[in-house]
Amino acid sequence: MSSSKPKTEREKLLEVMEKRSREAINLSKEDMLFNYKGVLYPTYLSSIETFQALQTLEARADDMVIVTYPKCGTNWMVQILHEVLYLTHNQEPTLKDTLLEFGKPDKLESINGQSSPRIFSTHMYYSDLPKSFLEKAKILVILRNPKDAAVSFYHFCNNLPVLPNYSSWNAFFQDFMSREVCYGSYFDHVLSWNEHLEENIMAVTYEDLKEDFAVHLKKITDFFGLDLTKDHVTEVEKKTTFKAMKEKSETTHGVVSDAMFRKGTNWAIQIFHEMIFHLQNKEVTIEQAMIEFGKPQKIEYLKEQPSPRVFSTHLYPDDLPKSFFEKKAKMLLILRNPKDTAVSYYHFCNTNPVLPSFASWDLFFNAYIEGKVIYGSYFDHVLDWNKHNDEENIMAVTFEDLKEDFPSELRKISDFFGLSLTDEQIALVESKTTFKSMKEKSSESHGKLGNVFFRKGEIGDWKNYFTEEQSQAVDAKFEEILAGTNLGKKINYNKYCKS
């Protein structure tokens, strides 16, 4: 009997957040907040009992505490300090050191068990921070101008289900100015810390960090007694400027493979999983399948998947989630010549019980050429993606090129996704993801549907099905819609679609 792997701290945290988010959806604003010493806090993230328990928490001399009003740079500074500790103490970045006031009172046992140096963050006022921290720990206060803080906080409230959301900016602004938001008044918060800028408390501004990161990073590390070399400072800067962190998230938090039905979707997924397995020892799985398949609640599951994630889709670009374009997720567009695509799709429809079947090839062809099959017109799909072909985060490859020079195309794909595979690893991935190899083990990977997903994988099979009239109809359609496009040229139509 197999036993499930123990959950990581990150998985536990996300699970709690998901559960509390679901519970909070139907609550009123009054029920979502509680009052502690005149300040409002989120009910589903904290409690009066937690605040009281924190007063017994014993600080250490090398503890690092980051104090901010919400949306003033908390997570940014946590990431910076984690990167610093990785360089100076070989201490891996982790998500288990969260806001002091979040969670239940029994979290103290976990905190006490953490190795030094510990990183804490908090939105608490000076008078609410555990006294031992004020006496022993180093405290970094990060300030941000109130106008930008307000705008960022407004969007944060409307994106986090456990916080009250607002129907308009004006409604939020009224609460922000009248101390009715979570964590109370920005101005009172800053004032409470202003009165205690002692030798163990240092203040920096979000704006100064943005404008001269290296200089202020050195000041911060000196304050915490962390001996960073110039090379260390450069390395941390590279990894924690907003630009660098965004780029990192783009390459590790969203690998998207787009392919029209029967262009090699499952093949590409298997290739990616094999690459990731050999780089990160991450087990091959087909759980992370088509974005558009399943029920709405699958989104929460997808959000929890560890990085890098592999997605696939047959969607048109206008229907793909905007964030994939905004965050420049790397997208691999797989093309296949329209005649072989049609034949493969015909068999797929007739062997897949959830799709409409066709009594004859001729009936299918008529629906295909008119764009009346599932997912619409092949030609419209390729044309829509052609509009994005010049974007640096999108790369097109063809099924035919993969079949004819698999190792070279694998290398291009792995380089595009920033997967530094050795020649030996490329050879291993190749051996496990040739069409022949995957078909042989399809019953293990896809169960009874193995033969549905892996039929022939041949080039030129269309010649066994197309009449001369049908071939000419596709020729004319291709000439009309795709012949003059970049992706049309990529398909190499004359080579693969002319008798």
Image: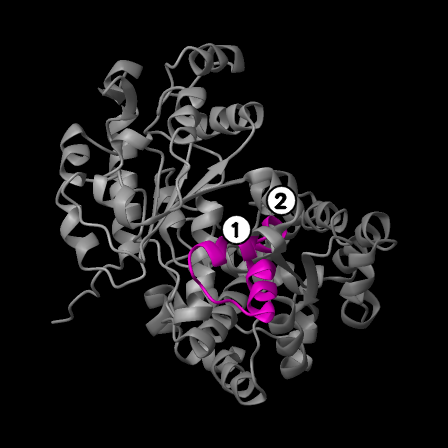
Q: Position of residue 104 (x, y in %)?
A: 17, 39
Who comes first in sequence, dot 1 or dot 2? 2
Quadrant of the image occupied by residue 130: top left
User: What residue sits 42% from the left and 24% below the top?
Assistant: 191
User: What residue sits 62% from the left and 44% below the top?
Assistant: 210
Is residue 227 toward the left or the right of residue 328 in the image? left
Name the residue tied to disc 1.
Answer: 358
Q: Determine if the magenta segment contains residue 230.
A: yes
Q: Position of residue 241 (x, y in %)?
A: 59, 52
Q: Position of residue 213 (x, y in %)?
A: 61, 51
Q: Nearer the viewer, mark 1 or mark 2?
A: 2
Residue at the extreme right of the image, as rendered: 484
Q: Amino acid at mark 1?
A: Phe
Q: Determine if the magenta segment contains residue 234.
A: yes
Q: Amino acid at mark 2?
A: Lys
The C terminus - image quarter: bottom right
- Label 2 CA crowd tier, 10 Å (few <14, some 14–19, many 20+): few
Is the residue 482 above or below the residue 35 in the image?
Answer: below
- Say which of 295 and 230 sits in front: 230
Name the residue tied to disc 2.
Answer: 210
Is the residue 487 above or below the residue 46 in the image?
Answer: below
Q: Secondary structure at mark 2?
A: helix
The residue stretch that appears in magenta: 217-245
Is residue 410 toward the left or the right of residue 196 in the image? right
**Residue 308 visible in image:** no
Q: Secondary structure at mark 1?
A: loop
Marks 1 and 2, how far apart at CA = 61 Å
Q: Which mark is residue 412?
A: none
The N terminus - image quarter: bottom left
- Say which of 443 and 26 sits in front: 26
